[in-house]
Image (cartoon, grey):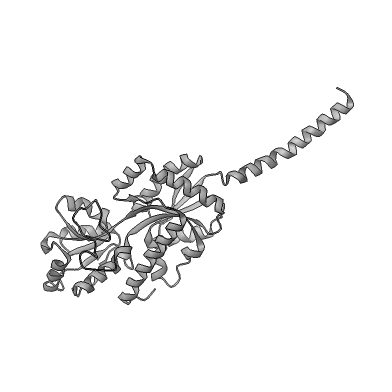
């Protein structure tokens, strides 16, 4: 090889060495974030949000071609996880799976939630919906809300309507039902659905309001009777919505799970994650697994998710105001 050829070869090799990392950088940029994705969940393992997050994360990893792991950050009704999302980098490495309580109810009932979903989060898409339900103990003999109201009216002081948490959507729904039925009873707040359902099964309380999944197995076994749900569902044919049962204004209290990202996530990443999420939710296996936990898949665009959140927040804000509750 001549000296000129050797010089040209060295120049070409140096050019390739410089260009290689640049190609890697631009290629990664074109594809978006390619590392592990953390999905924050504001509740302990085993609950509805955690269960749905794990079902979705497993399939989302395949769609994205990168690891997707669930990171539980329980506490304060999901506030800890929500605040962690707000502070997270906007590179696509951190997402947040949340129910309505955290993103709609907490900002309504706390003076300083530490986050505002409309400005601190970007919508990725709705995952699933699940209805709220009111169930009664058989001792009431009630087959509809009016009969429940009559029973409560003659048993003042010996029964109440249980809810799984204070300042929760079920508490305000229970309060609304009590006012409409003129039952003169206040919601009994528990620390979780399990102890509330246990007391309802034992007859310590006459009724309870919670997610439909907390009551369904006992309804099927004849141990409880579901009188109304936030929206009529094929899971309970013949059971009316609250509106159909005579308590208007509760249609938009249906709980839903959504996937969120930090506010500055680029548009291209939002599209990528939304597309992957909706592909996951279209899989029959995912539909069946979520249905097994009494959830209905609800694929959406980010704009539809934002609209849904706004509708639920408006409905819950009306209930909070009507109840006279003062944010803490």
Q: Nearer the viewer, residue 297 or 169?
A: 297
| Extreme residue in the top direction | 1
* Residue 46 image offset from top left, x and y in percent: 34, 50
Q: Is residue 170 visible?
A: yes
Position of the N terminus, as image quadrant, is: top right
326 to the left or right of 135: right
Left or right, 278 with respect to 199, comes to: right
- How far from the left and from the top, in percent, is residue 85? 49, 57
- 189 vs 24, nearest the viewer: 24
Q: Is residue 105 visible?
A: no
Snapshot quadrant of residue 126:
bottom left
Residue 173 occupies which quadrant of the picture?
bottom left
User: What residue do we see at 38% from left, 64% from top?
Assistant: 311
- Give the residue at x 42% y 68%: 107
Q: Residue at x 15, y 68 (%)?
A: 146
Relative to 319, say whether 66 is above or below: above
Q: Residue 313 location, x and y as percent?
A: 39, 66
- Residue 108: give x, y in percent of width and height: 40, 70
């Amino acid at each position: 090889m001549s000296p000129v050829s050797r010089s040209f070869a060295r120049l070409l090799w140096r050019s390739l060495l410089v260009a290689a990392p640049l190609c890697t950088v631009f290629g990664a940029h074109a594809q978006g974030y390619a590392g592990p994705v953390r999905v924050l969940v504001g509740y302990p393992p085993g609950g509805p949000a955690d269960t749905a997050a794990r079902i979705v994360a497993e399939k989302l990893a395949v769609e994205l071609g990168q690891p997707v792991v669930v990171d539980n950050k329980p506490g304060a009704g999901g506030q800890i996880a929500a605040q962690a999302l707000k502070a997270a980098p906007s590179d696509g490495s951190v997402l947040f799976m949340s129910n309505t309580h955290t993103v709609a109810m907490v900002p309504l009932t706390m003076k300083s939630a530490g986050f505002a979903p409309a400005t601190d989060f970007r919508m990725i898409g709705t995952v699933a919906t699940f209805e709220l339900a009111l169930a009664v103990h058989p001792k009431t003999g009630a087959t509809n809300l009016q009969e429940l109201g009559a029973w409560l009216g003659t048993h003042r002081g010996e029964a109440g309507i249980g809810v799984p948490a204070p300042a929760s959507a079920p508490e305000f729904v229970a309060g609304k039902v009590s006012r409409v039925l003129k039952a003169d009873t206040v919601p009994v707040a528990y620390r979780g659905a399990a102890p509330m359902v246990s007391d309802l099964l034992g007859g310590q309380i006459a009724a309870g309001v919670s997610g439909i999944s907390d009551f369904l197995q006992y309804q099927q076994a004849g141990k409880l009777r579901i009188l109304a749900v936030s929206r009529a569902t094929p899971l309970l044919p013949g059971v009316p919505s609250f509106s159909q049962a005579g308590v208007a204004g509760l249609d938009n209290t249906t709980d839903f799970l959504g996937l969120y990202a930090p506010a500055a996530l680029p548009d291209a990443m939002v599209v990528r994650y939304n597309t992957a999420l909706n592909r996951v939710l279209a899989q029959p296996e995912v539909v069946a697994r979520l249905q097994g936990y009494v959830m209905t898949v609800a694929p959406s665009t980010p704009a539809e998710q934002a609209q849904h959140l706004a509708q639920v927040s408006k409905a819950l804000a009306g209930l909070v105001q009507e109840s006279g509750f003062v944010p803490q």
